[in-house]
Amino acid sequence: MKWKTTFQVAATYVGAVMGAGFASGQEIQQFFARFGQWGLAGILVSTILFSLLGWSMLDLQKRWRVSSYPEFFERLLSAKWGKWADGLVSILLFVGMMAMISGSGALFYEYFGFSRWFGIFLTGTVIALALWFRGEGVLWINTVLIPIKFVFCLGIAALAVFIAKSGDGEGIVVLANPIVKNWAFSAVLYVSFNLTLAMVVFASLGKEVQRAGARLGAVLGGAALGVFAFVIGAALLRFPEVLGLEIPMVAVAGKLGDWPAFFYVIVLWLAMITAAIGNGFSLVSRVVETGLLNYNKATCILLLLLLPIAGVKFSQIVQFIYPLFGYMGLAFLPMILFFWQKR
């Protein structure tokens, strides 16, 4: 039973962090690969932090016996600042959902040559259908697609590193990011941004992640994320000509042939859908809890707000908005470690 909990927690951790921005290579490109070999060192730093903070976070949840993320934020930051954190998470979920829909548009444009808006509206339709079935639809889609996403994306990236012929291009120039200029600090910001989402997932699961073996699962999940990020980072550095693309890992998959690239596109699109559905369901459920709107109205309003602004470039969202949320989330990291070591 202990090992079952360990595996479930590790998979949940990976699923919470490994969204489409991760699998597409855009996050790894912006936070790590643009620093060259030092970016790989940054991935090692982030791996240690993911494992350590994951253990600490679950240890605190077990001690405090919390069962929702607003309750966890209140214990971590006080009642006043906990409400601000709750609001921050709601905005983060909205932006994450927008990033996935925007990334779908970029995917259809770069690979199939279709209009971005075709991909945006097609993805929005699939998300709407999944949210229509509420929690059952979300659970079914994640159960089926997340294992496929992880295994297939990791396999393609590893094959590209070890089998495909190395790139000979100079690469598209990746503009410097004025928000993040140091590889080590970039690694901390990456963990800060993603740990906020992981906190929401773990706190919402309550007693399910307070069993024996759960903390070990967080450590293993952090290690798995590090291995995957390292393989993607190595693939991007081996093929410098793909740097600067909206969806660089599709170009990497193309080094193995047309069919690997096609399947990577399909799996990546499904990854974007699962990430968007997870964010959307969490956000709609939070709105329903306030009593302002019922589930169906909240879902309709959310999609009507998202679709018109989803035309923002996927790379711009990852380059500028993600690091900003990383800065905002920096308050969580030291507080988690402070309360964890304070017995």
Image (cartoon, rainbow, N blue to C red):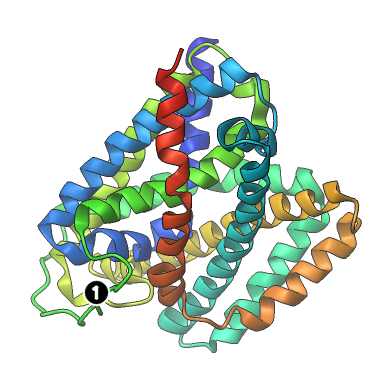
Left or right: residue 157 compared with residue 311: left
Q: Quadrant of residue 97?
A: bottom right
Left or right: residue 44 compared with residue 250: left
Q: Quadrant of the N terminus?
A: top right
Mark 1 surroundings: few (<14), some (14-19) or many (≥20) residues within 10 A: many
In what element is the residue under mark 1? Answer: helix
Please name the residue shown 40% across and 74% down the image: 315
Position of residue 54 measured from the top left corner of the image (x, y, whole percent): 43, 31
Position of residue 303 measured from the top left corner of the image (x, y, whole percent): 74, 71
Q: Does 243 appear above or below 185?
A: below
Position of residue 251 measured from the top left corner of the image (x, y, whole percent): 30, 72
Position of residue 144 measured from the top left corner of the image (x, y, whole percent): 60, 44
Q: Does 78 appear above or below 190?
A: above
Query: Is residue 18 at least partly visible in the picture?
Result: no
Q: Quickly name the residue at label 1.
A: 242
Please name the residue shown 40% across and 50% down the image: 152
Judging depth in this view, the residue of 123 and 62 nearest the camera is 62
Left or right: residue 180 compared with residue 116: left
Please name the residue shown 55% across and 38% down the image: 199
Left or right: residue 219 compared with residue 36: right
Please name the residue shown 67% across and 43% down the image: 80
Which amino acid does the dot numbered 1 rest on? Val
Q: How many marks?
A: 1
